[in-house]
Image (cartoon, rainbow, N blue to C red):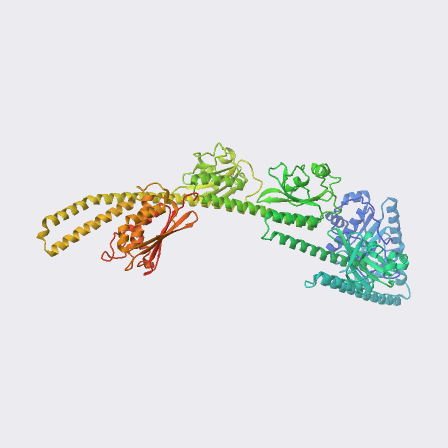
């Protein structure tokens, strides 16, 4: 039998097994001691010891199936199972049974047709049977013979001794040595005695057990021992040798595991620096390989190298030494395609080499270290004495592992340096976006080893790209550079891809014929798409006019993607801030009407959301009504014009009523609007809208639409920005409602006050006239009490007239005021002082006035404010002559005017009361007045869009301040 089953082309293709049944000692499925027992010839004679039918067929059918795939003739001897049961098991496990039987590739026999074909078991006859079977298979041009037999027939044959069967099995081993022959003998563990199964182990070189794993059987006994007289002695020697081999193997494995564990612990140590890790690895490698010296180098260009770390004693190999690469072992290693292993320099013919003369190393073991696809340096172990044994595969593997660990650490350090530098640039608060972008481009060129990089913007899909920022291009910063790559090439391909696009060398590809390569010479390229929110903005790329000597790694692609994400974030943030600032500017502009501001919002929203039209509509779910109130003036849509009406249920605005007040639709049919007027007749493909709920009016919807489809959903930032605009509109609509209601209320109040004061004048005049008649005609008829009562009545009538005059003046402030126009406050205060001149002189009042500004106002009403404030300051001055100061302070678009006195002051608890109509803080006996003067001042200031307030403490004077609008341009 052969030591290895031949691998011929399969005649019968079947489904691939999860793991093939392999019959040789070289397979990875073979488990057992390392190597064959000395002097034993292993062959393809397998024993299957199974415990149930499932396990039996899983192995036996796989054995047959593999033989069919190899082009072998396969024989199956059934006994424990019927022939039909065997064939059915083959069918259910993927064998084309009928085809195999018809072609003769598969033959199924019974035990009666084979082992007992002469009426009883005859081992000589069976040996002849198998010889004929192999000859027939060879004659029929099969690549070999594969047979498996159910051995339970031996249990049922009373005349067959089980020992005869075992001797027969042993005779099969040498009979067909060197032939393409494989045999699998099946033994039922539950039916065969244990002593027989022990003999089975002794007579089969390979054992198949449990999960169809082929185990090399070190219990196997060669024929000369099995049948020899010294069998017990030879079997003892073999077992003792096996124990020694297994002990040596275990020791070797434990030693390898210890070094490998120390290797991983060194690399995984979070407290050690890179230099400390490399030094520990060199010490570990020196011990593992039994060499005196270990060192790690970094190449410096093509002519020199530096020894980064070194362990062991050598005059010329020390950490920090820089030397020429010429005539060194490192030069040989870098020129080699793989590891260099020299056991003895003399045997290898190295003793005449200049490198040997310089360093005198008789044993050398080294590998090249790469970082990012480029040669970084070498990892070497050496000795000044020859090594007594060759380097093993396990030692080569260990050296490779150390090299890989160092490569990983170097790449990790490189990645960390790149990330730190990137973060330093992007987080610098002193640099603007352009400065950061330029530094990132320079960093990327250095990292990728490319000569140029840039940020390209695509203003129109399908159009040309414009260079926004570039380095290494030789282009003047003020010069515009446009490029137009073909579809599937360079930036055109990048902006359509979700992942970075890279081409190390355009040579031999379609890119070689693209105009970017032809015009700019770009030969290597890596780029990623840059987004502005959800809209593609352009590409962030790097390239070179020279081909790259290695492909772009996944790490490089990831770093580029990170840089592109930062650029996208900055672009979106810049755009978002621009739109928010624009929104704030529009909302805060005092010179534009609500309608003008809404038009500006429509334009802003169309730009922000990349949609065609913005609008406001009045909706009423109860009546299913939708009425357009306003749309942008720049876009003409047949169905969306002011005054246009439609059923609410036929519009996308329905979505703001049914669910969330904010709705966005990018797939109308999927959203359930495929049969609506908005989709079929209006042609609207994209919608973003918010419902605005109002208290006393029908609700509104604030929306943006487009007749073009949108290939991406609206982002959270876009939805939030739309809600901000809608909130401002809601606020303005509610404010307009409140102002309208207040104006109506004020108008009714003014009408009432005017009517009341006007109607009271006539009866008051009558009362006053008759009191005067009584006083003139009958004054002598009254006694002292009568005259006192009459005086009270006259005084009360006079005060009533003053109050009615004040109330009439209060009601006329809004209706009978003059238009607001520029007023010089200096001149106005001088006129008031002239009117109060007598009172000023009588009380000894001193009035100090700073330079007062020019304001927008009603001169007559402002004169009334200053007169009332100055009269109060004089009247409530206390016992000392009044000292009054008038000044002004600029505050934004308004002036704060203050009138300060040193009078009796006002308790903080009463400071709001002083502005209430007819609410007096003092009795008439203490101070005269109607109690309406400050209320008039407040009403006048409010008409001018300002506020008035007082700061005061009892006994410390008062400061009345009010605001007036400044004149534009001053």
Residue in the foreground of this view, choosing between 671 and 504: 504
| Residue positioned 19% across, 46% down in the render | 764
537 or 750: nearer the viewer:
750
Q: How far across and down, in percent of the image, does residue 308 sit?
A: 76, 60
Q: Is residue 927 above or below residue 484?
A: below
What residue is drawn where x is 46% and y is 41%?
702
Q: Position of residue 585 (x, y in %)?
A: 48, 44
Q: Residue 794: x and y, percent? A: 17, 50
Query: In the drawing, does residue 594 fall left or right of residue 933?
Result: right
- Quadrant position of residue 121: bottom right
From what the image shows, is residue 210 above or below residue 800? below
Q: Is residue 694 left or right of 380 when viewed as pictured?
A: left
Q: Against 309, is 594 above or below? A: above
Q: Which quadrant: the C terminus?
A: top left
Q: In which image quadrant can residue 35 be found?
A: bottom right
Q: Is residue 357 visible?
A: yes
Q: Is residue 565 visible?
A: no
Using residue 108 as the reference point, say whether residue 877 is left or right of it: left
């Amino acid at each position: 039998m052969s030591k290895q089953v031949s691998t011929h082309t399969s005649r019968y293709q079947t489904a691939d097994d999860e793991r093939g049944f392999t019959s040789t000692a070289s397979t990875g499925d073979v488990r057992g001691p390392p190597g064959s027992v000395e002097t034993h010839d292993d062959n393809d004679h397998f024993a299957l010891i199974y415990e149930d039918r499932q396990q039996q067929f899983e192995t036996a059918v796989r054995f047959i199936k593999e033989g069919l795939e190899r082009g072998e003739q396969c024989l199956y001897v059934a006994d424990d199972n019927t022939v039909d049961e065997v064939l059915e098991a083959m069918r259910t496990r993927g064998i084309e049974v009928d085809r195999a039987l018809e072609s003769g590739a598969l033959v199924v026999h019974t035990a009666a047709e084979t082992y007992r074909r002469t009426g009883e078991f005859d081992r000589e006859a069976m040996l002849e049977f198998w010889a004929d079977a192999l000859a027939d298979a060879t004659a029929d041009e099969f690549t070999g013979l594969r047979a498996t037999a159910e051995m339970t027939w031996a249990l049922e044959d009373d005349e067959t001794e089980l020992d005869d069967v075992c001797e027969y099995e042993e005779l099969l081993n040498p009979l067909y040595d060197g032939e393409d022959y494989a045999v699998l003998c099946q033994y039922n563990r539950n039916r065969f005695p244990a002593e027989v199964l022990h003999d089975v182990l002794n007579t089969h070189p390979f054992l198949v057990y449990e999960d169809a794993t082929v185990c090399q059987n070190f219990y196997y006994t060669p024929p000369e021992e099995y049948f020899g007289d010294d069998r017990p002695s030879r079997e003892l020697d073999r077992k003792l040798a096996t124990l020694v081999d297994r002990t040596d193997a275990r020791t070797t494995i434990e030693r390898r595991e210890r070094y490998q564990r120390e290797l991983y612990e060194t690399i995984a140590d979070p407290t050690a620096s890179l230099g400390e890790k490399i030094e520990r690895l060199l010490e570990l490698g020196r011990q593992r390989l039994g060499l005196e010296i270990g060192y790690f180098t970094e190449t410096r260009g093509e002519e020199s190298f530096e020894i980064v770390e070194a362990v062991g004693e050598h005059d010329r190999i020390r950490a920090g030494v820089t030397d020429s690469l010429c005539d060194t072992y490192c030069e040989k290693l870098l020129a080699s395609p793989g590891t260099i292993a020299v056991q003895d320099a003399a045997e290898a013919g190295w003793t005449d080499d200049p490198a040997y003369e310089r360093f005198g190393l008789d044993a050398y073991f080294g590998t090249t270290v790469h970082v990012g696809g480029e040669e970084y340096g070498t990892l070497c172990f050496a000795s000044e004495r020859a090594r007594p044994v060759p380097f093993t595969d396990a030692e080569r593997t260990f050296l490779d592992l150390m090299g890989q660990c160092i490569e990983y650490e170097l790449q990790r350090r490189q990645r960390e340096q790149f990330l730190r530098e990137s973060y330093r640039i992007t987080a610098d608060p002193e640099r603007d976006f352009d400065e950061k972008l330029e530094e990132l481009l320079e960093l990327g060129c250095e990292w990728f080893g490319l000569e140029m990089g840039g940020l390209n913007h695509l203003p129109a899909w399908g159009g040309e790209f414009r260079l926004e920022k570039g380095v290494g291009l030789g282009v003047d910063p003020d010069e515009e550079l446009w490029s137009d790559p073909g579809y599937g090439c360079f930036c055109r391909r990048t902006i359509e891809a979700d992942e970075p696009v890279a081409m190390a060398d355009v040579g031999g590809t379609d890119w070689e014929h693209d105009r970017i390569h032809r015009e700019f010479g770009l030969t290597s390229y890596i780029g990623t798409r840059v987004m502005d929110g959800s809209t593609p903005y352009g590409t962030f790329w790097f390239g070179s006019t020279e081909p790259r000597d290695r492909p772009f790694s996944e790490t490089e692609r990831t770093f580029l993607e990170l840089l592109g994400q930062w650029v996208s974030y900055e672009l979106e943030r810049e755009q978002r801030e621009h739109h928010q600032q624009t929104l704030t500017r529009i909302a805060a502009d005092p010179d534009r009407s609500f309608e003008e501001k809404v038009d500006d919002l429509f334009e802003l929203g169309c730009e922000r959301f990349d949609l065609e039209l913005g609008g406001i509509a009045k909706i009423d779910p109860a009546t299913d009504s939708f009425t357009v109130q306003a749309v942008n003036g720049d876009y003409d849509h047949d169905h969306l014009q002011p005054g246009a009406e439609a059923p609410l249920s036929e519009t996308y605005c329905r979505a703001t009523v049914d669910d969330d007040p904010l709705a966005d639709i990018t797939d109308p049919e999927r959203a359930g609007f495929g049969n609506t007027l908005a989709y079929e007749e209006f042609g609207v493909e994209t919608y973003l809208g918010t419902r605005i709920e109002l208290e006393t009016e029908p609700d509104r919807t604030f929306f943006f639409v487009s007749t073009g489809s949108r290939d991406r959903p609206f982002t959270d930032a876009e939805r939030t920005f739309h809600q901000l605009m809608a909130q401002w509109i809601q606020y303005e609509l509610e404010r307009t409602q409140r102002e309208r209601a207040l104006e109506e209320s004020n108008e009714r109040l003014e009408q009432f006050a005017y009517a009341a004061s006007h109607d009271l004048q006539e009866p008051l005049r009558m009362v006053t006239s008759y009191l005067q008649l009584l006083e003139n005609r009958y004054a002598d008829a009254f006694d002292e009490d009568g005259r006192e009562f009459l005086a009270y009545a006259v005084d009360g009538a006079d005060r009533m007239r003053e109050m009615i005059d004040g109330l009439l003046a209060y009601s006329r402030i809004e209706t009978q005021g003059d238009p607001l126009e520029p007023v010089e406050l200096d001149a106005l205060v001088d006129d008031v002082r002239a009117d109060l001149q007598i009172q000023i002189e009588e009380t000894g009042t001193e009035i100090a006035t700073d330079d007062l500004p020019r304001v927008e106002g009603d001169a007559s009403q402002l004169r009334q404010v200053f007169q009332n404030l100055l009269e109060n300051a004089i009247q409530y001055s206390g016992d000392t002559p009044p000292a009054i100061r008038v000044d002004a302070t600029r505050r934004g678009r308004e002036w704060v005017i203050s009138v300060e006195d040193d009078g009796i002051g006002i308790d903080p608890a009463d400071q709001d009361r002083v502005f209430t109509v007819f609410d007096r803080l003092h009795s008439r006996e203490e101070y005269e007045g109607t109690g309406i003067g400050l209320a008039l001042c407040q009403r006048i200031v409010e008409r001018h869009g300002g506020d008035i307030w007082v700061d005061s403490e009892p006994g410390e004077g008062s400061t009345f301040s009010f605001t007036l609008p400044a004149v534009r341009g001053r």
